[in-house]
Amino acid sequence: MNVSQLADQLRRDHMFMKDVTRWEVIPAREARTMPFPASMDERLKPALERRGIHELYTHQAKSLEAIARGEDVTVVTPTASGKTMCYNLPVLSAILKDPDTRALYLFPTKALSADQVSELYDMIEEMGVDIKTYTYDGDTPAAARRAVRQAGHIVVTNPDMLHSGILPHHTKWVKLFENLRYIVIDEIHTYRGVFGSNLANVLRRLMRLCEFYGSHPQYILCSATIANPRELAETLIGRPVTLVDDNGAPMGERHFVFYNPPVVNRQLGIRQGAVPVVRSISGMLLKNGIQAITFARSRLTVEVLTRYLKDMVRDPLGNAGRVRGYRGGYLPGERREIERGLRAGKVDAVISTNALELGIDIGALDACVMCGYPGTIASAWQQAGRAGRRRGTSIVFFVASSAAIDQYIVNHPDYFLHQSPENALLNPDNLYILMSHFKCAAFELPFEDNDQFGNAPGSKDILEYLDEQGILHHAEGRYHWSAEDFPASEISLRSAAAENFIIVDITDPAHHRVVGEMDRFTAPMLLHENAIYMHEGRQFQVEKLDFDACKAFIRAVDVGYYTDADLNINLSLLDVEKEEPFAGTAVAGLGEIKVTALVTMFKKIKFDTHETLGFGHVRLPETDMHTTAMWWTLPDELAEKIPSDRLKNGMMGIANLLRIVCPLYLMCAPQDIAVVYQVRSPITDKPTIIFYDNCPGGIGLAHKAYGMRDLLLQKALQVAEDCPCEYGCPSCVGPVGEVGEDGKRTAVRLLKELTK
Amino acid sequence: MNLRDKLRAVGGTGGSPRPAGEASTDCRHFAVYRPAEEFPGAYDLSAETLRMMSDRELPEDLDPRRILYLDTETTGLGGSGTVAFLVGMGFLGDNGFEVHQFLMRDYPEEPYLLKHVAAGLGKFDVLCTFNGTTFDVPLLESRLLMNRMDRSCLDLPHLDLLHMCRRLWKLRLGRCNLGRLEEVILGKPRVDDLPGSEVPQRYFTYLKTKRMELLEDILKHNAQDIASLCVLLNHMADLYRHPEKIRFSEDVYSMGRALEKLERTEDARRCYRLARRGRMGDLAGSALAVSYRRTGEREEAVRVWQEMVRERRGGIEPYVELAKYEEHVRRNYPAALEWTEQAMIRLSEPSLRADGTVQQVQNELQYRYQRLKRRIKEKEQDGT
């Protein structure tokens, strides 16, 4: 059965359709094209024509024109619209015209760069010209590095390598820096939060060096669909950009199915879980030979689903290669193999975390199943974009979990279909990040007294401070690096913590092997001792977690359960920036806090029934994070009137409501923020609800929330009042089991007081 | 909180502002003189001997007084934020060995220091360093570039003693750092030397306090390094000229390998022959035979292998080589079979069984054995 037939059959299936809240058909779209622009080098035309390309899509042609005018360009395109041509054509044209020209390509991951380079190689080969494209990353052999530095026309790398491998050694890259004409940055929507704030500073350093070497490169940026591509691009590079968002690529018909699993317990508002539903939808696709990708939110769910689907197709020898899991933490070789399998059609079903959301080339698939809302509209469209060929029909299933935000989306499909996607926010001037990069920049090139660092504020203060600390040394109008260490090695662009944990399989005592890695913040949750760690559906138990050496030792096991750890959060106040009274004696505040996270225990959960089998203790050191926060205290008289346990339930309800409302109105991902409540807060000494930026230093979300603090409370109240449940459910204040029978009533009462 | 307070909260506190100094005009210069007797043979070093030691292009009529010995002291291990704050340059003068050291007392003096270095380099024909190819030269290149100065002064023929020393002594010593070479090869261990790892911190402390005595150890250490370069080079030259002076058979064998790489085949074979009687007999014998085979002197090679078989040296290698020779050159299959059989017998001796590759070698022998049997049979059939 093909996709159209399957769609027809499903639409006639009443049992299925009763839980479908919306079946949207997005009609096919014709291609819109323009002739090759004059700025494109003649030699490219025959090469393109041999590949069947006789004209460019409108967005490609318009990018080329803007680039030819010398403008910095940001191209916004959905998956599979031929965006690489938007930068490859102008770059190749420029190198053909002047062989001294150099270009730098930045991709967020190694996998992506490997992919895009192979496409570039094909073009160059097709033309039979001598243009050298090299990948420069941690895997580049030492012997090849010299050649890359000297001769590479196009150097493909990632922000991390630029930061620690290229910029600090810029004197070895004279050729590149002196002749740098284009800086291409793909997938810029991934550079939000800490990563983006770091990249913006890496680019400030890059431009500082270009100035030293006398080059004036132009930026070509590409982004998936987000709400603020221009703002993001301009914040990243610190200069105005020309936006090209007129997508001319064709697209086949697409079906978008919103599915809400049925309610199994109406009083408690409990629905059937998303995982069993996805298991049967993905299973149905697999049986019909429709190549599909299933996205799950957590690594754990990926592993659980992979195991279910593998079991469906296992041959007598136990092999199930047609079904593969894919997530961060698999080793690169294994990932490449899965990607190749997908392109070659050897893999029929892949179950992935958002790791496959990016432009890694796995070809276009027929179907996509989303197990739960990925958190943002942008992300959801990226995932949905994995299904959809230029011709032919494709289908996307969104299966809602009981999480409030999922329920909101599945019951308001229009919000999803018509709301503009999220903003990608970053804050290059986050003081932690900024100061780190000042150090790196000073190492690379001394600062003059009046030098600025891109458009960063407070250069003079920061330089003087670093001089006082003895890290820089001021002499005759210049600040020189004056410490033994190599500053770039101390800074990881992707998180505040530098080191990843290595996962070592010790099942075979004679042959220990590394099977994966995990970042420092996630490790305590998933790799604590006795945790069940899953890898490609196989179970391992963590035997030992060596926190100081960043190593986890695991051993293969076969048990009927998985584990889930509880995270404990403590807050303390560092500084108050603003405070304002409201609703009588209540106070809203904005400031900096320290968040201490600690994993103390975990649950064992049975497969299939998902019941809790038992608990275990975890003994691990806590992790610290400084960030920005905003808070609301409750009015004194109200807090005194309500008994404390009831007050606690009401506040828990408000926190749950804010967790739903804030991501929607701040347009950010749910995991970017955290909302907690404290009946007696060490921050204010009063009952307080605290919202904080969930990344070190903050990326500006707390400031944005402070600006709309009244609106957020109003919207929280509205969600609670609009919800048909009586005492609370997962879609508003939280389930009754959590907030108690008076939770919803108290939350509504408090919110009414606060919004009076 | 204002920005400065926040910076303190984020990064901690300490230190106090430093008063501004006067504009700099030059860097500091030190000179050290050492008597010529400390450098035996140095004034007689010939271009011919040097060419025996290195494959670098060297000037036709090299005067040993036109070799510049250079060593830097730096603020770190690399990257464009690492600075050479002290550069020492030594050479043979009319009245002994002279070391001239240029020290930047603060960062603004760097251009002056570099100017002296460039001028110094300009007066010599050959540069001699220890690990300069990967460290000192790229570092100076980077510093010149960052000060927008001409880098061509570094384009001198370069003798990197680290590589030359490794060739001769790595087999015996393992690690070849300058301290170890001074101690073991020159027999002059250093006393009270400042460990290299402490150098950057010393200099940073000096920058803050400007107490010159902090740098005394560094200056002494640097001058000693440079003098050692000259002694070491001439010690090596002596050994290249008179390999029979070498007391360790590992070193004799290493010398042979080094000479062979520089295509001084006769000298190399002389070393191998010397080394055949010692601990390195197996390796030296096989190197000697391979050397003959390489130049087409097969009969000589065969004679060496036969000697090795007689002396029971070199494991099964000589048997295999002899089998190959009989099979492929002489086409004497029965003789080849005989050698192969002997090799198989030899391989069963317990002293050779410990080697982890035994199984693979056995398989190869087995394969050779079968093939020879087949060939003998085919030949018999052809004959009838």
Image: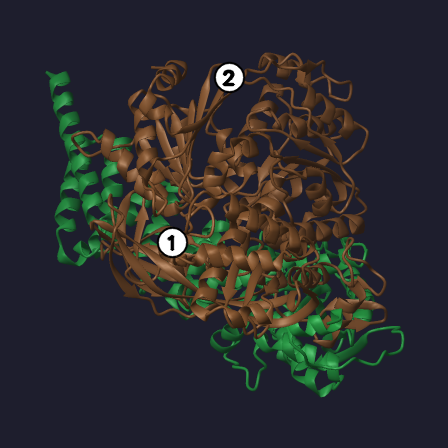
Chain colours: A brown, B green
Q: In the rendered picture of this protein, how many numbered marks are placed on residues? A: 2
Q: Residue at x 77, y 28 (%)?
A: A66
Can residue B318 be seen?
A: yes
| A487 w.r.t. A60: above or below | below
Q: Nearer the viewer, mark 1 or mark 2?
A: 1
Q: Is residue B64 left or right of residue A648?
A: right
* Foreground pick, A428 / A678: A678
Label 2: few (<14), some or many (≥20) within 10 Å? some
Label 1: few (<14), some or many (≥20) within 10 Å? many
Q: Residue at x 54, y 33 (%)?
A: A416
Q: Is residue B66 left or right of residue A533?
A: right
Identify the disc placed on residue A253: 2
Q: Quadrant of the C terminus of chain B?
A: top left
| A450 w.r.t. B327: above or below | below
Q: Position of residue B226 (x, y in %)?
A: 65, 73
Q: Position of residue A682 (x, y in %)?
A: 55, 74
Displayed quadrant of residue A334: top left
Q: Position of residue A340 (x, y in %)?
A: 41, 30
Q: Position of residue B41 (x, y in %)?
A: 61, 71
Q: CA distance from mark 1 to mark 2?
A: 43 Å
Q: Earlier in the sequence, mark 1 or mark 2?
A: 2
Can residue B90 be seen?
A: no
Q: Secondary structure at mark 2?
A: loop
| A455 w.r.t. A30: above or below | below
Q: Is residue B188 left or right of residue B89?
A: left
Q: Residue at x 46, y 67 (%)?
A: B175
Identity, as a three-letter code, of the amino acid under mark 1: Val
Q: Quickly name the residue at label 1.
A: A736
